[in-house]
Amino acid sequence: MIPQAEIPVELIHKLPKTDLHCHLDGSLRLDTVIALAKKQGVQLPTFDRTGLGDMLAAGEHVASLDDYLRAFDITLSVMQTEEGLERSAYELAEDAHAENVRYIEVRYSPLLHIREGLRPAQVVEAVLRGLRTAKREFGIRYGLILCAIRSLGPESSLRIAELCVAFKNRGVVGFDLAGSEVNNPAKLHRQAFQLVIDNNINCTAHAGESFGPDSVHQAIHKCGAHRIGHGTRLVESGDLLNYVNDHRIALEVCPSSNVQTRAATSWETHPVDFYVDYGLRVTINTDNRLMSDTTVTKELHLCHRHYGWSLRTIKEIIIAGFKSAFMPYREKADLLAEISRELSTFVDPRGEVTGRVGLVESDTPTTGPAPAPTKPKLTAS
């Protein structure tokens, strides 16, 4: 019984987890980037592992989301072949399995991988092959989310939506709108969202990351998004925050990435602790494992250290991840029962009474007006 000690990262590592917001082109292994470049004859800025790692890492040189996204030019340069795509997908699933992620949703935009002549359908098939192989070998469940890019225009978004329809029930579980929100409003892409919704396909959208709550409003009310990627600036609108809470719209929060892209100025001002405290359906994710040098285990442990989250809170967030998965209900219900039983076997080493979490957790949101969103509770008491 060590009441003041941290929960060991090794314990969080053992917990079954999800990763619902993970970009394939931001989650390659550094050694794989170098190996693929040499094999494909791609000229990297440097082949020195340390130097390249510094270029790809989100360090002090990153001042905004746009700065953060520039590193993707390097990873995308080695992801223009079926072999490169298949290997990248397989290794991402293997890395997730290694930290006991039981279900991962991998997202990327096929249109960013056709520079060397691949067709978008070939790109999707290559990634699915890698994920299927990983599932056979490791047992990790997966879903593929295809991303439209805001800056590429509504027509390209419609092409991605059509791909989602074509690969429905073949591994693709959702549609996403990604890219810089500034001067690229989600409402311009309504036709693509309507197509996937008309075909009963799930959709999410990056919103409230580099732009205010109006971006979240458009994603939900103009485009029909079922989940919100990031949602960092949702805290600025108490009314919209209550709507998201009342309708149990999950937030795909990626804390380290948000701090690195300056969506949040620091861990202390990041609203995720307020979201959890207020009862929103929060999921914790990696965003880009390479650029952010992170894992789901690391993200949860950092939240524990910064906000004092108990093991019970961590378990509840993990359950929220499984509840929010773009997975058929029957399959999800069985998996939730299994995960809930497994989580109940883990005890907080600090002697905290954590109780049973999971299926008995109420989905009833907090009612009443939101506290003043400009002054959220951001630190543990």
Image: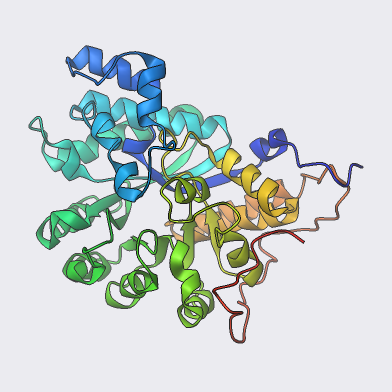
Residue 33 visible, this orientation = yes
Q: Is residue 275 left or right of residue 150?
A: right
Q: Is residue 139 left or right of residue 316?
A: left
User: Where on the picture, by quarter, is residue 360?
Assistant: bottom right
- The percent coordinates of residue 236 (x first, y second) are 47, 73
* Closer to the camera in the image, 49 or 361: 49
Q: At 48% across and 44% down in the image, what residue appears?
A: 286
Image quadrant holding the C terminus, namely bottom right
Q: Quadrant of the N terminus?
A: top right
**Number of numbered discs overlaid on the protein picture:** 0
Left or right of 275: which side holds 350?
right
**Residue 162 visible to the viewer:** no
Q: Position of residue 34 (x, y in %)?
A: 31, 17
Image position of 57 with respect to 197: above or below? above
Considering depth in this image, is 238 or 88 the residue closer to the camera?
238
Q: Residue furthest right?
A: 1
How far across and how far down the image is residue 135, in percent? 44, 34
Image spot of residue 167 (x, y percent) = 23, 50
Which residue is farthest bottom? 368
